[in-house]
Image (spheres, rainbow, N blue to C red):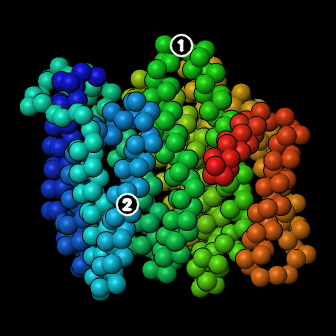
Amino acid sequence: PTQADYSTIFFWNIFLSLFFYGVLYLSSPLIAKFYEIPLLSNVLKVQGLILVLNALILIQQNILKKQVNFKKIAKINIGAITIGTSAGIATAFLGFGVWSLVIKSLTTGVIQCIIYWLSSHWKPQWRFSGKSFISLFKFGSFMFLNGICNNLYYNIISLILGKNFSATSLGYYTQAKKVEDIPRNSLSSVITNVTFPVFSEMQNDLPKLRETATKCMKSIAVINFPLMILLIMIAKPLFILLFTDKWVQAIPYFQILCLSGVATTLFELNTNIIKSLGKSQLTFILETMIRVIGVIAVVIGINWGVTGMLYGYTFSQYIAYVITAIWVGKLTKYGVVHQCKNLFPIFFAAVIPAIISYLISLFIETEYALLLTIQTVVYTLLYFGISKLCNIKEINILIAIIREKIIGIKY
């Protein structure tokens, strides 16, 4: 990218953020009326400013991503989140209510904006290149539309729950989703932020891209499969210890979401492979089709209540993985059959320990903290042991990383 490219996109981002903030500002009374929460109108008008704050730092963030400098991004984000969260907690104690969440979000955004601008060598020039805009818009417009559709889709369950079921059911779902999001989003950020620039460098060398994609797929599965399956197994003691037995009804929601998380990370990796080849239009078409299937599955699932909706959503995530894997196969010769052959030993190594650990726990009557510890330790040991027996090479990489981190901590 040239300086003209960066400056052009910077000003385009600012324009878009102001436009959509205006749309949000004007539509906030209607949104508040839809949910029958009058306060929501003013909250959205203030909270919406985060759109503009985020637009101010997109170029600085993406320059660091292209440099694969995620350490600096992490430091900035962690620092800003720490300050923002502290502000939110302080104002909550002072009785600000829901506004404390708004203050938390905006404080985080302002701190991020300040640090990125002070620490970045890049500064925009007062220029807007039509040539740059047209060439970048061919790719970026579809990614932009795809991003909007994804955000709408991933929030549709909350919207349907809030309109068709009780506030209690929505609360249980929201809590389950927040807990499931922590590990899944951690992996998703690695997939979307790290693999895209790496794969893009190999778009003209398909054998190398195929080899790298294979390694990434297996390496992610080695972490994601056991993590999601372990969370399904320990869901009950985990939720009771974290939130007390008042949140027991959120446990099945959490388990179903974790089941969907097994497929979601693989789907996102396949999508990134397609995007890295410059196929943004294909990505948009595929994901639009996938989202339509997802909405249909969720709507059908309503007939069986909240759990039926979540099973419909989970089913759609597995369909999404299969569809994107088929297209990756057409583009790179690393399709769904090859991927499943690579992933099955890892899935086997993740599922068997869960069955054994669960059967052992049936004969143990103890407090939830100890039960959680026993299940986690037994599962982890069995998973590593079976992985070694199955000759899953990626497990050796994971062990080496863990060993290095432990040694680093000791010294």
Q: For the point 18% across and 24% down, which residue is it?
A: 4
Mark 2: secondary structure = helix
Work out whether residue 128 or residue 32 is closer to the camera in this orientation and state it.
128
The answer to whether residue 127 is left or right of residue 312 is: left
Image vertical order of residue 358 relative to residue 54, above or below: below
Q: What residue does disc 2 label?
A: 81
Q: Are marks 2 and 1 in contact (CB under 8 Å)?
A: no
Q: Residue at x 68, y 69 (%)?
A: 235
As drawn, 255 above or below 194? below
The label on residue 249 is: none
Along the viewing direction, whichever of 152 and 222 lies nearer the viewer: 222
Relative to 348, is 397 on the left or the right? left
Residue matched to label 1: 205
State the separation of the CA atoms marked 2 and 1.
39 Å
Question: The residue under label 1 is which amino acid type?
Answer: Asp
Q: Is residue 10 left or right of residue 175?
A: left
Q: Amino acid at mark 2?
A: Ile
Q: Position of residue 241 (x, y in %)?
A: 65, 78
Residue 318 position within the rendered picture, expressed as x and y whole percent measured from the top left:
62, 46
